[in-house]
Image (cartoon, helix red, strand yellow):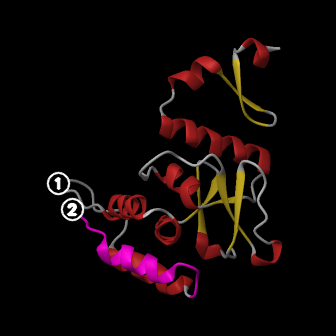
């Protein structure tokens, strides 16, 4: 009834948010809320990747966030996706993920490489630049170009590896 009345917004099956809270969120926070809702419905073993992991890491993309959440799954399970969910059957190892707010996400370096291999050029560069950004005064960068290169090498071979290499080489710490 509350959904029909407009006081609730459905994020996923069984996961709702008050419409006043939803309306107060910006586009980044709305996508993060969608990812968190997916985490609640999928359970603790789900590993979020690509733009979904980037959103939780606080990395920017150029353009709108995707309509679906992105998951990293084992090769054996296949990449079959469902409405609102994009599965990437690239394999998952312990080195591939960490947790943010009790949600399993690909590591920062893995997230950047995944986006570099699949997203638009502008978005991939913006994401990589943000990840290695070294402020003139302040904390050290979260990643270095060497970290990204090492992750790229660890992941080889993968689809989009040449494109990802060009993005890593092009990324700048002062952008």
Percent position (x, y) of residue 21? Answer: 58, 22
| Magenta-colored span | 157-174
The residue wearing badge 1 is: 137
**Magenta span has 90?**
no
The residue wearing badge 2 is: 174
Percent position (x, y) of residue 38? Answer: 71, 46
**Residue at x 55% of width, y 22% of height:** 23
- Name of the residue lying farthest toward the left: 136
**Residue at x 81% of width, y 34% of height:** 14
Task: Answer with mark 1 or mark 2, whichever residue precedes in sequence.
Answer: 1
Frontmost residue, 41 versus 95: 41
Quadrant of the image for the N terminus? top right
- Say which element carries label 1: loop
Frontmost residue, 24 versus 106: 24
**Residue at x 43% of width, y 52% of height:** 61
How many residues crowd mark 1 within 10 Å: few (<14), some (14–19), many (20+)?
Answer: few
Asked if 100 appears above or below 146 in the picture, the reply is above
């Amino acid at each position: 009834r509350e959904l029909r009345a407009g006081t609730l917004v459905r994020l996923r099956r069984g996961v709702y948010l008050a419409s006043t809270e939803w309306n107060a969120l910006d586009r980044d926070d709305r996508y993060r809320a969608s990812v968190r809702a997916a985490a609640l419905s999928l359970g603790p073993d789900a590993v979020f990747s690509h733009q979904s992991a980037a959103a939780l890491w606080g990395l920017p993309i150029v353009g709108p966030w995707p309509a679906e959440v992105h998951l990293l799954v084992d090769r054996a399970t296949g990449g079959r996706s469902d409405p609102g969910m994009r599965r990437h059957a690239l394999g998952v190892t312990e080195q591939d993920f960490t947790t943010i707010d009790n949600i399993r996400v690909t590591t920062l370096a893995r997230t950047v490489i995944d986006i570099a291999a699949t997203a638009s050029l502008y978005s991939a560069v913006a994401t990589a630049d943000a990840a290695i950004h070294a402020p003139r005064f302040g904390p050290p960068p979260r990643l270095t170009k060497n970290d990204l290169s090492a992750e790229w090498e660890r992941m080889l071979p993968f689809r989009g590896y040449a494109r990802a290499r060009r993005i890593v080489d092009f990324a700048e710490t002062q952008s």
